[in-house]
Each structure stands twice: as structure tokens, then as C-alpha cells.
Image (spheres, rainbow, N blue to C red):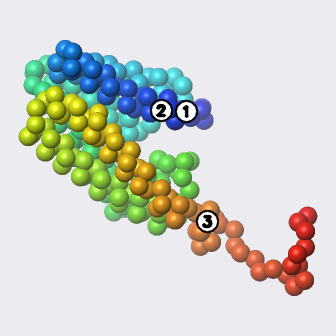
Amino acid sequence: MSDTSLHPGLKLALDVGPLVLFFAANARFGIFAATAVFMVAVVAALGVSWALTRRLPVMPMVSAVIVVVFGGLTLVLHDETFIKLKPTLIYLLFAGVLAVGLWRDKPLLAMVFDTVFDLTPEGWRRLTVRWAVFFVVMAAVNELVWRTQSTDFWVNFKLFGFVPLTLGFALMQVRLLARHAAAGDPAAPGAPAATPPRPGSAGRPAD
């Protein structure tokens, strides 16, 4: 397996690009054509990620499967309700998986992002709780928007509402990441133990 990781800009483009195409196609051709474009774009983005890294991130892969299934139902049954329910299902699925991980004392974020962040067990627990709650709130917001607003408003909100909210929430976790960084916690597992200075060693230059 390759250890190659995507450039942050390319990763953002692969994550947001399908939504941009969904938005553009809906404005020009309507929700059903936009759903077909969205399905193709999501699968294509996953394929590009695989071609460059030789691995499939769990969350984008699960999202792609749900997009294909619910997008297919939308097109076959000619009912836009299914594509509108897709974000709700994804958010609740992610929240449920994180909650089960906490219940089993195995924060799953630590398994997914252990190569990106090095946090204490308490840090992973708090970060997992926050993201689980955030996903539940986002599911509720999606339900409120699609059930009370027009289809065009919902499509616009997917790009100009959900994306900024998610990025903003992620940025709000920076302080938690810094506060619970394992490298800066003397009590964290694997952290080097502090050693008292030896008598007469003050001012001694480093070897």
C-alpha cells in the first residue's frame, strides 16, 4: 500500500468538486440531471483518490456508496426525496458509528486520523463526542431545510451551508487539538518522562 497522501488543495477539490457540479447541473438542467452528474462525479473523485494514493478513505467511500444507492433510487423512481434524504442518512450513520466506538471505549477517530493527529486518549474522546453531536445536528438541519424549503434552496444550502459549517466546526477544534496533543502531555502514553537536572549541570552547553 502506498503511503502517498493527497495535497490538501487536491483533497478539498475532490471533496467539494462533486457538490459544485451538483449545484451547477441543478441550476441548468434540474434536480434529476444534477443527481446523475453528482453520482458520476462522486465515483470519479473516489477513483482519482485511489489512483493517486492506492487506498480508499472510509468516509468518502461510504458516502459514495450511499450517493449511488440513493441517487439511483431518485432516478429510477423519479422521486427527489431519496437524494434529499441522503445527507441525513450519512450524518446519522457517522454519528452512530462514532457513538458505538465511544461505547466500546474505542474512539474510531483515533483509528482514522492517528497518522494526522497525535492526541491523548481524553483528547480523542472529546473530539469524537463533538463530531458525533455535530453530525446529529447536521442531520436535523438537513431534514429541516429539505422539508421546509424549495429544492433549489436545498441544493444551494448543500454547497453554501453544509460546507462552510463543516469547515468552521473543524477550525473550532484547533484549540482542543493543541490542548490534548500527546507530545505535549507528560502523562500521555509514550511521552518521555521528565528528568530532573543533575547538580552542577546548569549552564552546561549541549553535547
Q: Is residue 87 above or below residue 113?
A: above
Whether tag 2 and tag 1 are in contact, CB under 8 A, the answer is yes
Q: Which residue is mark 3?
A: 184
Question: Where is residue 148 drawn, in percent x and y?
Answer: 8, 40
**Residue at position x 87%, y 85% in the image:** 199
Question: Where is residue 97 drawn, in percent x and y?
Answer: 32, 51
Identity, as a three-letter code, of the amino acid under mark 2: Lys
Question: Where is residue 38 drawn, in percent x and y?
Answer: 28, 23
Give the secondary structure at mark 1.
loop
Q: CA distance from mark 1 to mark 3?
A: 27 Å
Which of the labelled discs sits on residue 7, or is there none? 1
- In the picture provided, is 104 more to the left or to the right than 111? left
Mark earlier in primary sequence (1, 3)? 1
**Residue at position x 37%, y 51% in the image:** 169
Q: Residues within 10 Å of mark 2 (few under 14, many from 20)?
A: some
Which of the labelled discs sits on residue 11, or is there none? 2
Q: Residues within 10 Å of mark 3 (few under 14, many from 20)?
A: some
Quarter-of-image position of residue 79:
top left
Q: CA distance from mark 2 to mark 1?
A: 6 Å
- In the picture provided, is 69 more to the left or to the right than 117? left
